[in-house]
Amino acid sequence: MPRPGHFRELEEGIPDERKALARALRGLVPVIGLSLRQTHAALASRNRGCDTSASALSDLLNARIRKPKRDVVRALYDLAESTARKNRARMPVTWEELEDLRLKVCEPPALLCANCQASVLPVPSQQGDRQHSQGRWPPAVNLLALKRTRRAEDVAGILRHVGLAGGPAEVANAVAACRAGGLRPEADMILGYAQAGRDGRQLAEIAYEFMRIGDNATARRVLKMSLAQ
């Protein structure tokens, strides 16, 4: 990096989501006011759990990392926020905005139907209709195929996306469909991600969707999660 705030053009062919995150992160660099190596040293001294390097930071700021780590992005944001507070400077982006951009980068690519090549992920759930307890979530078929071919990373990405970013109805139907398809561990992983990434109100909304599809046992389980938040 030549000097703080001055960057090379982002390479062509990089997905728009990664470019958007990189531009937002680049906005933090002038606030921090350090060189790349100094920034890395500052991150290392502030947060020993921040697993990164100067070259990895360069890749992050140039949108070369496919799945940016949350702890690295958060550490960079916290360093900028701390510096801005000392200098009474304005932050160019909020943490919520930054995390939303990061999650979009980490979303798995849409899987395609083997017959028609139409996208099947993510699939918006039908609203307003009481659905069968097996759930209506077409990606469950793709999950089973990915698991059989040992594509664990792709499976984990889909489960993480649904648990953290899927709508309440999609979460409920995804869990039900996974269970119906013999993917009970995967169903539990979706619930685990939902519990870790959502507040009590959001979990209560998911519990309501489980009641709508007739799965009262899981609805009670998720309600307990919401009360524990």
Image (cartoon, rainbow, N blue to C red):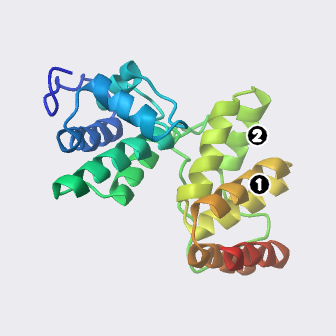
Q: Quadrant of the N terminus?
A: top left
Q: Is residue 144 left or right of residue 97?
A: right
Q: Across the whole image, how many numbered discs are drawn on residues?
A: 2
Which residue has dot 2 on it?
A: 144
The tag on residue 187 is 1
Using the rendered view, name the quadrant where residue 145 is placed. Answer: top right
Viewer-proximal residue, 3 or 117?
3
Amino acid at pointer 2: Leu
Q: Quadrant of the C terminus?
A: bottom right
The tag on residue 210 is none
Instruction: Estimate how packed mark 2 is, as few (under 14), some (14 to 19) or many (20 or more) residues with alpha carbons within 10 Å.
Output: some
Q: Is residue 93 left or right of residue 133?
A: left
Amino acid at pointer 1: Ala
The location of residue 212, given as percent across then percent down, is 70, 80
Q: Which residue shows up at 65% across the image and 48% down it?
A: 159
The reply to whether residue 110 is visible in this rendering is yes
Asked which secondary structure carries label 1, the reply is helix
The earlier-in-sequence mark between 2 and 1 is 2
Asked which secondary structure carries label 2, the reply is helix
The reply to whether residue 130 is visible in this rendering is no
